[in-house]
Each structure stands twice: as C-alpha cells, then as structure tokens.
Image (tube, helix red, strand yellow):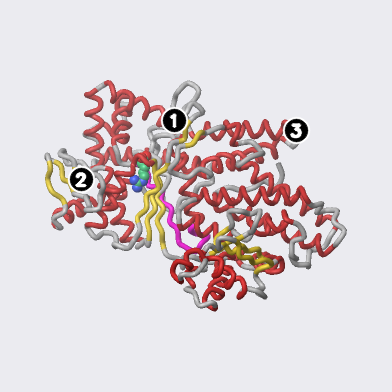
Amino acid sequence: MKKILDLIAAEMKSAFAACGYEESYAKVVLSNRPDLCEYQCNGAMAAAKAYKKKPIDIANEVVEKLTGSQLFSECSAVMPGFINLRLDGQYLADYMNRMQQAEKLGLENLGCGETIIVDYGGANVAKPLHVGHLRSAVIGESIKRMGNFLGYHMIGDVHLGDWGLQMGLIIEELRDRKPELVYFDEDYTGEYPTEPPFTISELEDIYPTASGKAKEDEAFKERAQTATFKLQNGYAPFTAIWKHIMHVSLADLKKNYGNLDVHFDLWKGESDAEPYIPWLIQDLQDKGLAYESQGALVVDITEPADSKELPPCIVRKSDGAALYATSDLGTIIEREKEYQPVKYIYITDKRQELHFTQVFRVAKKAGYVKPETPMIHIGFGTMNGKDGKPFKTRDGGVMRLEHLIADINEAVYDRIMENRTMPEEEARETARIVGLAALKYGDLTNQAAKDYVFDLERFISFEGNTGPYILYTIVRIKSILAKYYEKHEAVKGQIIPAAGDSEKALMLEAAKYNDVLETAFAETAPHKICQYIFDLANAFNSFYHDNKILTEADPARQESWIQLITLVKDVLTTSIQVLGFDAPSRM
Ligand code: ARG
C-alpha cells in the first residue's frame, strides 16, 4: 500500500502542476502544530522565490485547485504562505479498512529476497555471555527481523570469537589441572576421547582462572601463546581439545541466546576464516596493497577526504600471527563466495569503529566486495548502571546475562503478584515474557550509538515509555475484544469516519505504520519503531479513555471501533515481533 504521506504528496503535486508550478515544491510533512492541522505543505514559500510572487498568493492558488479533493476535509492557506491540511474522515477510514485487508497490514516489500548479512552476537567461546553482549544480540535480532519482514533474505551470523588466545589459555590451564590427559602426552598416537574433559561449569571456571594467571605469570602467558599458535597451525591434540571446548560451550550459548529469543542462521566463527588467510595475505601482497612496516604486514587505508589520519590496517603481526582484522577479511571472502550479499551490517560496541573502517576499506580496495555494496557498522554505546558507569554486579564484577535476566524476571513476577492473583506457573511464564520485553524495549528505545542507563525499576514499570506499557496496551485491547465477542458474532461492519478527535488521532497514528517500518529499516534504527508504538499506544489509551466501547449503543459505531482497535492491536503486535518480543495473553 502507498504511504499516506505519498498519497497526499501526489495530490498536492497535481495541484501545484495545475497552477503551473514545479511539482517539487509540493512536499508534505506531518504538521508541527497538531492544534492547527494534521499535515502541512511549506512549498509556496520556496516557490515564491523562484516565481517572484508572494507566497500567500501561490498558496491560495493551490488551495483553490484542491477544492473538491476527496483527500481533504480542510485545506487552507495561512500567512505567510503555509498550506494547512486535514485529512477527510472517509478517506482516512478507507485507508484503515484497506490496511486491515492488506497483506502485512499494507507494508510493501522493499527487498525481493536479496541477501543481507547481519553479523551480531559476537560471543566469545568458553566465556559466559555477559551484559556487554546483550546490546549486539538485541539490536541485531531486531534488524534481522525487520529485513526479513520487508522481503530481504537476512542471514544472521553469530560470528563467535573461537580462535584467539582464550583457547590457548584454556588448554594450558587444563594441562595444569589434569596433566594426565592424553592430549598432553606427546607420544600418544591413538584416537582422542569423545567425552569432553570438562563440564560447562568447569570450563567457566577454567577460563577466568587462566586469564587471571596470564596477567601475573609471564611464563604461563607464553605457554598459552604457544598453545594458541599450535592450535592455529593444526596440532592434532589441541584441535581435539578445541572441538570439546566448542561443543560444550556452544550448547550453553545456544541456550542463553534462545532465552533472549535471539536466533542465528549461522553459527560460524573466527576459526572458519582460517582457511582463507594464507591466500588473503598473498593476494594483498600481489596486488601491491600490503607492505612490511616494522616487521608487520600492513595495508594503508587513508582516503583524501579523511579529516584525520587513520592508522593502516595490520594484517599480520611481526611474529606471523593473524589478527582480528585478518579474520574479518577472511570471513568476508567466505561470505562473498557463499552468499554474495547485497549489504553487510555489523553490530558491535562503538569502540570497534576504527577496526571496521579499516576492514571495510581493505575489502573494497582489494576488490573483495563490490564498490556499490554498503558495509555498515552499527556501533552501540554502553549500558550503564545508575551511577553512570558501565553496568556491574553489586560487588563490582561483570554481570552475567543469565543473572540479569533472572533479576528482571523476579522483579516482574513480584509486580504481577502485587495486586492480583494468578496461578504460580502462569505468573512465572508471564514474568518471563514481560521481563524480556522490558529488557529489550529498554535497550532498543535508545538510539543505538548512545549510552543508556539500565534502570530496572523504570524498565519494568507498566507506565511510561516501557516495554510492559506497550504489552499492557495490547493485553487491554485483547481483553476488550474478548468481552465483545462473548456476546457478538464476527464483525461485518467496516471502519467508519471518526466521530471524535482522539478517534481520528488514533487512525492517523495507525496510518503511519508502513512509513515507520520502512524508515526504521532503511536507517537501521529500531528506536524509531519503539517511538512509534509508544505514540500509538498513547493514542489508543486516550481514545479508550474518551469512549465506552463495550456499552456503545449504535452498532455501526461499535463495530467500527472493534475493527479499529483490532487493527491497532495487529499493528502493535506486528511491531513488537519485529523488535523481538511478544505479548502475554494477560498480565
Ligand atoms: N567477538 C568479538 C568481541 O567480543 C565481536 C565480534 C564481532 N564481529 C565481527 N565480525 N568482528 O569483541
């Protein structure tokens, strides 16, 4: 379905053209004075300069041409030359009816199945997920869902950190704990055991211990580096340990991402880039892009338009080791080979911005990615505690994601039980659904690049700009509908022109739906959807406050309201699914 703003703009364009003015002056925007009008066109002011006329004269001429238009109930020229517009009630009601009939509520496909890679999650194997990974997972999942909904073929890749020093650290700590294991017997030639030599809880203890040791014990760190090097060069016993680490850790990561309702299409990682790296290094040298600098191999990435000097991208260290950038480049080569995406979207902490600038420029310079393929890095800000510092546990440690989720669920559970009774099991399940919405909405409602404060009390509140408030609104609509259908058959009547201001305001809000979703995806900005559903929920609640839906005496009016609130519920439900959470049946 065409966007309502485009329909209005088309009508304005023909009016401008009919008066002999360029169509491009006919731009229409939402009114910034809702008390005066709903939409406005400021084009007469700009046209006045070009045609050497008074803006108000042009505005009057255009308004004259619009008499009899089916789109507007009001169209007036006001000084110095604004054209104020109000939409015709029947036209708006028809638009609502068409939305309700249309597939995807009138949202048109932007894509035709083109592949877009979304690289998000970024968990590191053998390290528990902590709050630092939360934002990437939440934002990435929502962008992926938006794209799929708009007709693209989104491929979400978790891109695990599974190849770095943490692997060597674990191997050496394991050697210290269990030196008798066959992996450490150089003379062993048999098969390696299929049973992992540790459980997930042991693994979670091994890594931090080893990482602590490496900071104090230089010899241990060197052993870990050597082990990492051996692993990366295919040393069989360490490859066997690595497989166990992957197996045990992945099961746990999948469970944790699943609890966040975050799902990846690919569970690839840095290790998958490994086979491409020797070719990559050679190719960069053959193309004359990579050169030796202080023993390392680097690629210059500066461009004439840069306002500050950017350091070159290091693709090989002086000791021969590959780096983070090398593995990202190797991954790009693999992705081009396997998926030929039309776009890349990476979601990480914004402190990685330089890294991605370097990687993207090398990828383009070397011709691995087509010049026209957008490569986007969405760098997000930090989730802070109320003290304004990065969020920590009460005793100052790194907060594990599972604990954070458990805390939220507990708090929501208490709130639910405060003023009503619900069977324990249902209350727990509801708390889980509402808690996830609180967490995700609390994050997504902020512009990604900004830091935000994680405020549990505020996030779980049923009032204000929160996830639970949105869910509460959906649940409220569902309950009105349930009560209505207890006494009525399926509604046949259509949505008729609004009788009151809050009703029309609600329709105007609902009509923005396709525009908002398209814009949010084009700008990779989930916060725009949050802002929209908050406005829509507010509009619904004002409408609800002004009208007694269930006791309305006029059946045509009542049926229209039932249709309208069903549409609003569908818009809200679709929007939250795209954001990555669901509504409970009651709360
Ligand atoms: N594992 C990385 C980290 O924890 C994030 C990976 C992001 N993705 C990428 N392609 N570099 O910082």
Q: Quadrant of residue 259?
A: top right
Please, what is the three-letter code of the amino acid marked with disc 3?
Asn
Decide if residue 97 is in sight here.
no
Mark 3 close to ligand 1, CB under 8 Å: no
Residue 64 left/right relative to 399: right
Q: Quadrant of the N terminus?
A: bottom right
Distance from disc 3 to disc 1, alpha carbons, whole Å, reads 34 Å
Q: Mark 3 or 1 closer to N-term?
A: 1
- The local secondary structure at tag 2 comes to loop
Please, what is the three-letter code of the amino acid marked with disc 2?
Pro
- Identify the residue under disc 2: 312
Tell whether position 414 is magenta: no
Residue drawn at (30%, 41%) of the image: 163
Q: Mark 2 or 1 closer to N-term?
A: 2
Disc number placed over residue 110 in the picture, else none: none
- Identify the residue under disc 1: 390
Q: Position of residue 509 (x, y in %)?
A: 63, 56
